[in-house]
Amino acid sequence: MLFENLNIIEPILKALKIEGYTSPTPIQEQSIPPILEGNDLEGCAQTGTGKTAAFAIPTLQLLYNKQAGQKGPRKIKALILAPTRELAIQIGESFTSYGRYTGLKSTVIFGGVSQKSQTEALKAGVDILIATPGRLLDLMQQRYISLQDIEIFVLDEADRMLDMGLGHDVKRIIAKLPSKRQTMLFSATMPKEISKLIDSILTNPIKVEVAPVSSTIDTIDQSVYLVEKRNKKALLMHILENKSFESVLVFSRTKHGANKITGDLVRFGIEAQAIHGNKSQSARQLALKNFKEKKIRVLVATDIAARGIDVEELSLVVNFDLPDVPETYVHRIGRTGRAGAEGVAISFCDNEEKSSLRDIEKTISKAIPVIEENPYPISNSTVVIETSKEVKSKDFKKKPYEKNTHRNSYFRKDKKRN
């Protein structure tokens, strides 16, 4: 299947060719045709599967086909709502890239920065608005934004939106939208709250699901170290001795923890920066830019700040702290192994986190192999972790990295040293 087979217009095909895209991913192949036909759509897909293009491409085409002959100032015809500024910026970049030959204008608004440049862009006229809920409501209250002309509404990362407590803001925004509109909702997971939201805002939606709910991508090599909490820092340094991991994303549960990990890495001589909610927008964007351009090797992030991080060929994701919510694990490791590429995800599990590990395994319906060559084992770590019925204890005896010869070689050498 090629993009040409999806009846995509030439201006967008031309842009896609420049981006190097020829074949759609499953979520794009299944979503673009029904959206172009004017249907509401419910999309369930893991992060890294290409869902931004799945709604950006048809949105651009629908608006392009309608703009012919229209006169007067531009009015906002499409609204894309995202939970974080990083994700909003990423979506904005996609619309700019795919729509470069359409003549359509898009802009991104988010909080944490001065609104002046954003309001100036709005005054100049915008066809497509990508926004985070807080700043959108703020500018609506100041009468810079009207949603009365919206024809297309996209709610992206809906599950994360609710996780962050933005459900009330989302409902306030939806209440201001025209009742006659085309709506698309995308989410990596489909908890009951999302199902209720779908019933309230979508009309006879086409359902597209390209992967089982809460599943993890098969191309990601997952493993876990059982380690004392006090030894996590030393274990991270040990892993980073493997130079084949050129770009590493480390997840911390807290902002303070992210800062501490970053400081330790820098003192150890490893280029690293942190990205979390207490950082200014400019600092967050600089850290992300440095990471994408490989000026730094390690980016340490909290879950909220990590939404929207899209780095090609990300070598490794490290869960320094296991998440409290099992679905968050899926989001985290989905930063690697994107678009069919191979990836590696390593988790640290201390004694207090064993229940979280069990919950994660139950959610993804598989056991995460324990790394046996561990320089910092938990005392009595040979005892098999008590698991749910869905996960067999014998699965914990699997050795990771069997398919990755360069990493397997590294761990063999390390075993000899110890």
Image (cartoon, grey):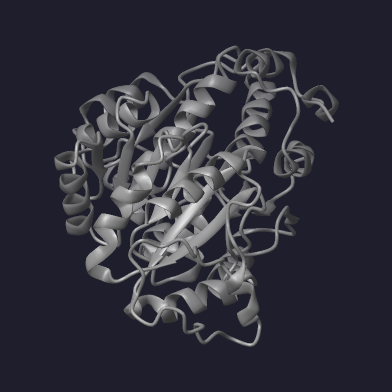
Quick check: 40 above or below 370? Answer: above
324 or 367, nearer to the observer: 367
On the rendered image, what quadrant is the C terminus found in? Answer: bottom left
Q: Is residue 112 above or below residue 386?
A: above
Identified at 74% across, 57% down, the residue is 207
Residue 151: x, y in percent?
Answer: 59, 39
Q: How many marks on residues?
A: 0
Left or right of 353, for residue 407:
right
Q: Going by the picture, which residue comes out furthest to the front? A: 416
- Name the one closer to the observer, 415 or 227: 415
- Residue 180 visible in the shown view: no
Q: Position of residue 263 (x, y in %)?
A: 15, 46
- Quadrant assignment, res 192: bottom right
- Residue 329: image x %, image y %? 48, 62
x 28%, y 23%: residue: 120
Q: Quadrant of residue 297?
A: top left
Residue 29 in view here: yes
Q: Residue at x 37, y 23 (%)?
A: 293
Where residue 375 appears, as percent x and y from the top left, is: 35, 61
Q: Name the foreground residue: 388 vs 121.
A: 388
The residue shown at (25%, 24%) is 117
Task: Please determine whether, in this image, residue 155 is positioned above or below residue 4.
Answer: below
Is residue 69 shown left or right of residue 254?
A: right
| Quadrant position of the N terminus in the picture | top right
The answer to whether 230 appears left or right of 205 in the picture is left
